[in-house]
Amino acid sequence: MTDHDPWACADPLGEALHFLRMSGAFYARSELSSPWGLDLPPLPHCLMFHVVVTGQSWLYVDERAPVLLRPGDLALVPHGAGHRLLSDPDAVATPLFDIPREFASERYEVLHHGGGGAPTRLICGAVRFDHAAAQQLITRLPSVLLVETATSPAGEWIHSTLRLMAAEAQSLRPGGETVITRLADILVIQAIREWIARDPAAQTGWLGALQDKQIGRAITAIHRHPDRPWSLETLAEVAAMSRSAFAARFTERVGVPAMHYVTQWRMNLAQTWLKDDGVAIADLAGRLGYQSEAAFSRTFKRVVGVSPGAVKRAGRPIRDALPGAELARQTA
């Protein structure tokens, strides 16, 4: 009988995609008539997405050339940059928070805007991904990611998903927010999968390392078991490489030494878990492999720049950083 290798069938990239679970989602259905324009403010640490249900929209992000979105197209703005959506390039953009809206729920609103001409309907969302693996992946995406369903191999089922999302957004029946959130999960993950499959940039750096059979196994081990007393020797054993070859290859593929990555991963997880009011710092230290709260706190402050207690005190629900909450504060 051969020994079972726990990393033999690991799919490091698949596991990273598994962690793409949205938190703090806020959605809007926009009923627009040309000419119209929306000026969306920056939302740090949020991914924003836009789906054109009917009509069309021009998307302007940073200094990039504008992108024309047609029915069924899905656009991601992964890094929370401010951007504009316009009925045509000459339309004037109105600040988002100046536009009349109806609050269907705490996390869902309906916007009405425009000059009475040709109609456009959009479904938009602002979401966060709190898990450290998701954050690692999101930071590596381009400033705009577009899925044109007319040319996508998965176009038909994407269209079906969009139709279901549009129907839920139109009626917002009991449980509709949950359905929309799950569908948005699927659409965002599919958009990222398509980018990984077609863009050479996805084959380099951390994403490329995840797809390296041996280095990917080591990264999987770190991700699954941050509490283990990892060393170059034990990680090289997981990768089935010599210590020196593993150290050189890990640094080459990932961009940082392996033990630096272990520490950074633990601190990323710590920042995620500190948002949970029920987690004590001492318990967190143990979950990350530290023998004492003091040792963990020293490392955390060295890497992050502030104490874990400061991060815990500063934590707040993500909905406070999303459009509906901002509007509620402005109009209170």
Image (spheres, rainbow, N blue to C red):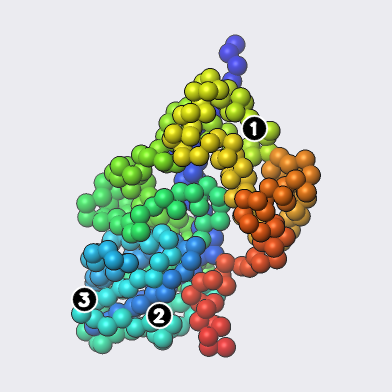
Residue 186, percent from left and from top: 42, 53
| Mark 1, residue position | 230
| Mark 2, residue position | 96
Helix, strand or loop status at disc 2:
helix
Closer-to-camera residue (188/144): 144
Q: Quadrant of residue 32?
A: bottom left
* 3 or 2: tag closer to the N-terminus: 3
Measure the C-alpha gap from mark 1 to mark 3: 55 Å
Residue 131, percent from left and from top: 56, 52
Q: Residue at x 26, y 71 (%)?
A: 57
Q: Quadrant of the C terminus?
A: bottom right
Closer-to-camera residue (189/53): 189
Residue 180 seen from this side = no
Helix, strand or loop status at disc 3:
loop
Residue 165, percent from left and from top: 39, 63
Q: Answer above or below: position of 239 versus 167.
A: above
Q: Quadrant of residue 265?
A: top right
Q: Residue at x 43, y 35 (%)?
A: 253
Pair 2/1: label in front: 1
Residue 91 seen from this side = yes
* 2 or 1: tag closer to the N-terminus: 2
Q: Quadrant of residue 183?
A: bottom left
Q: Quadrant of the N terminus?
A: top right
Measure the C-alpha gap from mark 2 to mark 1: 48 Å
| Mark 3, residue position | 88
Counting other residues with Cα less than 10 Å from the Cα at mark 2, is it few (<14), some (14-19), or many (20 or more)?
A: some
Q: Amino acid at mark 2?
A: Leu
